[in-house]
Image: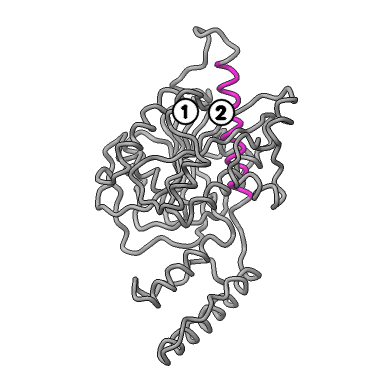
């Protein structure tokens, strides 16, 4: 069912322009359809803030559950923001205090950029843990992406992520390890997932904490895991929300950073650029190097020329997982709302799969 544009957040209009069904609040209120309220704690840096909104909102809106989806975007202090981005947040985002007052059925926590060797040294750590503590008691299920997964592992289990020898960056083949789990219902048993990270939580660390691994890559790294109750906490190390061009934009950022002396020349994202895309990149690199050698300006990065050669091999599976996740949230919250307290579901096993 559709998203409901219950605030003036610009992403509602952007999504509608790209074909997403988005109801006005006045129309939504005329329909006798159950509401689900989904929080989006967006901690992404300025350049990715709005696109991250749309990526997660699109996944929520593509769910076919019989509900109207109200997405409540908010952020936390301690994240480096430009004046322009902070003004955007102040204008369009809700506050955590308002989220606490109104309540949520589910919560999504995005990734973030970090600058310290330990996550608990970040300025946003304390505000984030306040959200986590509240959600643990008041939200049916919390879904975490990449850095936020590492943060919750640190907070709940004192698990420190492991620095990789090289960045896991690209599109990687994965396989389901628990095919009968409700969150994996009717998804492909083998599929791709984008990753973009320097750190990992290992399978041994995850299973040692009593979590259930649901999806792993072919090299044995965990992509998706859930808390022992199978629903309250859902952890992703990858980025199922990514658009077809998300890794391309990261490559563009890093390549331009290289030409400006900010970082080393980036490799190609693995399993993402076919031969034709690599040839486009190589031609651009030669042109850029020649321009700099001759004292000229960098040529414009030919982003549009890459797009016909890129494939999205993860989107359908991501939609199916989000559909199952929101369906489980709907089911659990529906039982809680309609049964006497003493007859409620077992909070240690809300999906009833053990």
Q: Position of residue 304 (x, y in %)?
A: 62, 71
In front: label 1 or label 2? 1
Judge whether 342 appears above or below 228 on screen: above
Looking at the picture, tell me which residue is in the foreground, 119 or 233.
Answer: 119
Q: Is residue 124 left or right of residue 317?
A: left
- Describe the element under mark 2 as helix, strand or loop: helix
Q: Position of residue 246 (x, y in %)?
A: 53, 60
Judge whether 56 appears above or below 198 on screen: above
Q: Is residue 78 left or right of residue 23?
A: left
Judge whether 77 appears above or below 221 on screen: above
Who's the residue at 37% across and 46% down the image?
Answer: 203
Q: Residue furthest bottom?
A: 294
Who's the residue at 43% across and 21% down the image?
Answer: 348
Q: Which residue is label 1 attached to?
A: 98
- Near mark 2 (Cα within 10 A), the count class, few <14, some 14-19 or many ≥20, is many
Q: Position of residue 93 (x, y in %)?
A: 50, 39
Give the main secondary structure of the magenta stretch.
helix
Residue 329, numbered label: 2
Q: How is the image coloured?
A: one colour
Magenta stretch: includes residue 248 = no
- Describe the element under mark 1 as helix, strand or loop: helix
Looking at the picture, tell me which residue is in the foreground, 63 or 345.
Answer: 63
Number of numbered markers: 2
- Residue segment shown in magenta: 316-336
Judge whether 48 appears above or below 271 on screen: above
- Near mark 1 (Cα within 10 A), the count class, few <14, some 14-19 or many ≥20, is few
Magenta stretch: includes residue 318 = yes
- Whichever of callouts 1 and 2 sits on the residue coming sooner in the sequence is 1
Q: Is residue 30 left or right of residue 218?
A: right
């Amino acid at each position: 069912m559709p998203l409901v544009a219950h605030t003036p957040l610009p992403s509602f209009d952007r999504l509608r322009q790209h074909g997403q069904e988005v109801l006005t609040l006045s129309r939504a209120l005329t329909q006798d359809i159950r509401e689900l309220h989904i929080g989006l704690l967006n901690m992404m840096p300025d350049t990715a803030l709005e696109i991250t909104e749309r990526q997660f909102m699109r996944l929520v809106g593509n769910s076919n559950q019989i509900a109207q989806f109200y997405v409540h975007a908010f952020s936390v202090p301690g994240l480096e923001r430009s004046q322009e981005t902070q003004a955007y947040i102040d204008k369009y985002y809700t506050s955590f205090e308002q989220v606490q007052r109104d309540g949520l059925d589910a919560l999504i926590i995005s990734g973030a950029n970090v600058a310290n060797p330990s996550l608990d040294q970040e300025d946003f750590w304390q505000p984030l843990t306040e959200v986590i503590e509240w959600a643990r008691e008041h939200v049916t299920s919390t879904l975490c992406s990449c850095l936020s997964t590492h943060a919750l592992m640190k907070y709940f289990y004192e698990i420190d992520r492991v620095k990789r020898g090289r960045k896991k960056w690209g599109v990687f083949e994965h396989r389901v390890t628990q095919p009968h789990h409700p969150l994996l219902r009717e998804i492909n048993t083998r599929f791709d997932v984008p990753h973009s990270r320097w750190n990992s939580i290992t399978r041994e660390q995850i299973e040692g904490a009593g979590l259930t691994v649901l999806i792993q890559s072919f090299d044995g790294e965990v992509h998706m895991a859930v808390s022992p109750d199978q629903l309250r906490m859902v952890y992703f190390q990858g980025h199922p929300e990514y658009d077809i061009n998300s890794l391309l934009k990261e490559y563009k950022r890093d390549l331009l950073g290289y030409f400006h002396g900010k970082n080393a020349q980036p490799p190609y994202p693995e399993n993402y650029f076919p031969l034709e895309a690599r040839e486009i990149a190589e031609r651009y690199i030669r042109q850029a190097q020649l321009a700099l050698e001759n004292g000229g300006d960098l040529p414009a990065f030919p982003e549009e020329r890459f797009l016909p050669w890129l494939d999205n091999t993860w989107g359908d599976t991501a939609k199916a997982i989000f559909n199952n996740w929101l369906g489980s949230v709907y089911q659990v919250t529906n039982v809680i709302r309609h049964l006497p307290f003493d007859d409620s579901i077992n909070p240690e096993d809300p999906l009833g799969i053990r």
